Amino acid sequence: MSAQQVRQRCSPRAGQRCRLSLRGFTLIELLITLAALAIVAAVALPSGRLDNRVQLSAAATMLASDLEYAQSLTLSAPGDPAILRVAANSSGYWVARKSAPTTPIARPDTGEPYQVVFGAGAARRLEGVTIAKLAPAGDVEYDAFGRLAGGVDALFQLKAGAATMVVSVSASTGAVTVGG
């Protein structure tokens, strides 16, 4: 209906009321539209649970970053090198100083212990991920030049469900590599 037609129908004469007969949506139409939107949203939105490969990728990135941080701490204070130690129950790891290997250092941003527990804290979305140090046994320790103190490449295996991912540290350079 055009504006002119509305004006003509709505020009009140003596005692006439203006009535617009514009049609709205029925309840059925609204319910069908809402049902269609709900179906699209259910299909399009993720379930909130991360896929095992995504979890492993996130855990590997976190581990690589923390290994590089331990290396930089050692380069800045080689007298008391930083180490990375895997928890005995494979639930995570922490960064500590060699002089106090069982006590995680404080995070520079929050002051909290520099400890990663998969499924808690910053790693809360990584529940079910486990970590194992494949080689060599013991802690990851860097020397004053950023190389691994033991002279042997370090290998970590992250596992989530049936999926696994390997993180390696080069003994000669301290470079971290995330692989499949």
Image (spheres, rainbow, N blue to C red):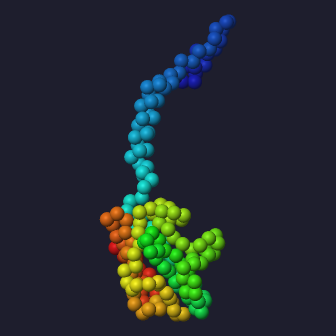
Q: Residue furthest right?
A: 14
Which of the 4 image quadrants contains residue 97? bottom right
Q: Establish if 36 lies above or below 156.
A: above
Q: Is residue 83 left or right of residue 136?
A: right
Q: Is residue 119 visible?
A: yes
The residue shown at (40%, 84%) is 137
Which of the 4 image quadrants contains residue 121? bottom right
Count the labels in the image: 0
The residue shown at (40%, 90%) is 152
Give coordinates of residue 69: x percent, y percent.
54, 80
Give coordinates of residue 31: x percent, y percent.
45, 30
Give coordinates of residue 46: x percent, y percent.
42, 52
Q: Residue furthest top?
A: 14
Q: Is residue 109 visible?
A: no
The residue shown at (42%, 55%) is 49
| Residue closer to the observer: 34 or 114 | 114
State the quadrant of the C terminus.
Answer: bottom left
Give coordinates of residue 134: x percent, y percent.
37, 80
Q: Establish if 164 lies above or below 82.
A: above
| Residue closer to the observer: 30 or 96 | 96
| Residue closer to the observer: 48 or 30 | 48
The residue shown at (54%, 93%) is 144
